[in-house]
Image (tube, rainbow, N blue to C red):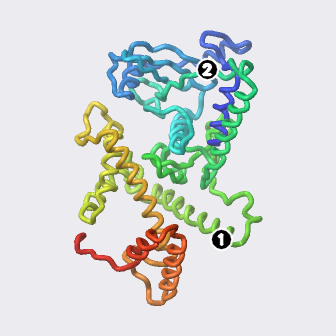
């Protein structure tokens, strides 16, 4: 469904936008379609929220004008006094399920950006109409450029080949994204517990993603909106599971069982321990817990993880507090914060590699190995020999040998 969403937007770039003109009419059922699209909302409050989304004041809004009418949303172009422009989008009343569609579109765009896919940046959003503007909304980046449908036939053959090649490469990257279930993407804290979200790992984003109910029109159109039917997420084995070699079937089955454990735990916690579930799904709950638990890490020689959390906290201070006007009490320059997050990613990668080595050998976090697992020592020696063989230079081999990760080391500085 995520790939469908992207390809639909890519397809829109390849043809002129003749869904509904800014000031036009439909050839039939015009009155009915206009009635379905009529949406009353508080323009003044929407402008105020828009300004807040880009850290400016309502008085800084120079113009607010209709940009386009699509099949599901009405778009406005907002221009600030400093010349900065961005887009506000609100769904039509007939667009259903509005809260899920808005939440899923925002999460999908953010997920794609976190994987390097060129899509607009989201500044702020509301998946519910219970706000001062009285409507769901998305404030997002205005993408400048030409409509490809307007210039396609004026491009040279080489330009068309180059463009389609890039498009296919982009599509290939989309198909390379792996998901543990079928369904639509959401932020974890945007879905209620009864939707049984399935977590989707994305280490490069500050938000937790999950898969939830599918938002395809066929699942919700008309009276189907009120049917109590299962719309996902649907955990599954890969379609070619039965054709895989036995070793790969074992790996897939193990991964499925691990994900199923998490899925069942979250679902049953929501049903039987709602207070704990609320704590788990509280806005930025993971970041809040990390800052608390990592406050003592510098005493163990680790200054990086806590600082990275504080950088992330400062970057999301407005969302964390709910009021962007309150300044964050800590400040990091752009260069300092970027360098810190870069080093934190490297540290995270190194920690994952170390954890993989521990699991391969059968060693617990504190180095404990049950006496009956005497094979662990042999596996550790084999791992060291493989690491030395893979070293590209003698200097690298010396460093590996002198600083082997499972050798004794001095702990006096960290006690």
Residue 98, image x and y in percent? 55, 32
Above or below, 205 relative to 380? above
Residues 379 and 127: in front is: 379
Residues 304 and 250: in front is: 304
Q: Residues within 10 Å of mark 1 (few under 14, many from 20)?
A: few
Q: Quadrant of the N terminus?
A: top right
Which residue is painted at 60% across and 55% down in the image?
180
Q: Quadrant of the C terminus?
A: bottom left
Q: Secondary structure at mark 1?
A: helix
Residues 286 and 131: in front is: 286
Q: Which residue is disc 1 drawn over?
A: 250
Q: Residues within 10 Å of mark 2 (few under 14, many from 20)?
A: few
Which residue is painted at 57% across and 62% down in the image?
260
Q: Which residue is disc 2 drawn over?
A: 146
Q: Quadrant of residue 389?
A: bottom right
Residue 327, image x and y in percent? 25, 35
Which residue is painted at 46% across and 46% down in the image?
205
Above or below, 40 relative to 386? above
User: Which mark's residue is nearer the viewer, 2 or 1?
Assistant: 2
Above or below, 123 relative to 110? above
- The extreme front residue here reads 394
Q: Quadrant of residue 131?
A: top left
Residue 176, image x and y in percent? 64, 49
Q: Secondary structure at mark 2?
A: loop
**Can the viewer see residue 119?**
yes
Which residue is painted at 54% across and 45% down in the image?
115
Marks 2/1: CA–CA distance: 50 Å
């Amino acid at each position: 469904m995520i790939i469908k969403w992207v390809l639909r937007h890519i397809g829109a770039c390849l043809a002129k936008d003749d869904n509904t003109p800014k000031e036009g009419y439909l050839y039939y059922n015009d009155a009915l379609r206009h009635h379905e699209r009529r949406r009353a909302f508080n323009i003044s409050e929407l402008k105020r929220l828009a300004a807040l989304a880009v850290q400016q004041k309502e008085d800084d809004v120079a113009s607010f004008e209709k940009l386009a009418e699509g099949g599901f949303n009405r778009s406005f172009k907002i221009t600030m006094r400093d010349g900065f422009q961005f887009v506000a989008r609100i769904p039509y009343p007939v667009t259903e399920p509005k809260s899920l569609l808005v939440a899923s579109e925002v999460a999908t765009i953010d997920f794609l950006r976190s994987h390097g896919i060129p899509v607009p940046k989201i500044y702020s959003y509301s998946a519910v109409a219970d706000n001062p503007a009285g409507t769901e909304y998305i404030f997002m980046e205005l993408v400048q450029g030409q409509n490809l449908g307007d210039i396609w036939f004026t491009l040279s053959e080489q330009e068309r080949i180059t463009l389609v090649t890039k498009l296919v490469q982009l599509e290939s990257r989309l198909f390379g994204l792996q998901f543990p279930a079928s369904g639509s993407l959401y932020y974890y804290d945007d879905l209620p517990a009864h939707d049984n979200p399935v977590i989707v790992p994305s280490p490069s984003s500050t938000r937790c993603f999950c898969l939830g109910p599918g938002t395809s029109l066929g699942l919700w159109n008309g009276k189907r909106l009120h049917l109590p039917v299962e719309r996902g997420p649907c955990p599954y084995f890969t379609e070619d599971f039965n054709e895989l070699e036995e070793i790969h079937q074992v790996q897939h089955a193990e991964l499925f069982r691990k994900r199923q454990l998490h899925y069942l735990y979250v679902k049953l916690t929501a049903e039987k321990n709602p207070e704990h579930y609320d704590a788990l799904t509280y806005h930025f709950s993971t970041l809040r817990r990390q800052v608390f638990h990592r406050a003592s890490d510098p005493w163990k020689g680790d200054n990086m993880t806590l600082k990275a959390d504080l950088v992330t906290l400062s970057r999301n201070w407005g969302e964390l507090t709910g009021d962007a006007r309150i300044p964050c009490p800590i400040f990091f320059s752009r260069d300092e914060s970027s360098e810190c997050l870069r080093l934190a990613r490297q540290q995270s990668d190194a920690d994952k590699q170390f954890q993989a080595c521990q699991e391969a050998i059968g060693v617990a976090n504190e180095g404990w190995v049950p006496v009956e697992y005497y094979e662990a020592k042999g596996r550790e020696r084999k791992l060291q020999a493989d690491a030395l063989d893979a070293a590209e230079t003698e200097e690298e081999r010396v460093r590996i040998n002198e600083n082997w990760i499972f050798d004794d080391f001095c702990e006096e500085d960290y006690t």
